[in-house]
Image: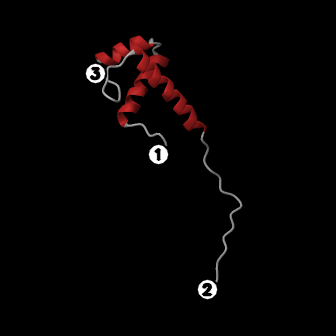
Amino acid sequence: MIGAYSGYQVELSDKIITLRDEQKFTYKQIADQLIAEGYRSPRGFDLGAESVFSIYKKRKIRDVRLNAMSDPILSGVEVIRLRDK
């Protein structure tokens, strides 16, 4: 899978998007809320407003990119059977 997120990354970024888009928290408020709930960055560091913003921004960009991908269409295919010699 292209740029697959781990389960933890999906959970963390989903939580950030919910707090930002639905509850209108600031990035600082999101960081404080996540720290209070025991969340850390995917690499195990403390979350700050800057890292929350980065996770939010990159997830939004990823979602747009993945949703813009279309299914490939195969057309004009010709199958030729080779005869045995």
Numbered circle sitting on residue 16: none
Q: In which quarter of the image is residue 32?
A: top left
Is residue 82 toward the left or the right of residue 45 in the image? Answer: right
Give the side of residue 80 with respect to residue 7, left or right: right
Label 2 sits on residue:
84
Q: In this view, does 47 lie above or below 59?
A: above
* Secondary element at tag 3: loop
Q: What residue type is labelled 2?
A: Asp
Residue at x 30%, y 27% (from the top left corner)? 44
Where does residue 60 sit, x and y in percent of width and height?
52, 27
Q: Is mark 1 on a helix, strand or loop?
A: loop
Q: In this view, does 4 lie above or below 18?
A: below
Q: How are the residues colored?
A: secondary structure
Q: Which residue does the numbered mark 3 point to in the structure image?
A: 38
At 64% from the left and 79% from the top, the residue drawn is 82
Q: Position of residue 48 (x, y in %)?
A: 38, 16
Question: For residue 1, which numbered disc appears in the image?
Answer: 1
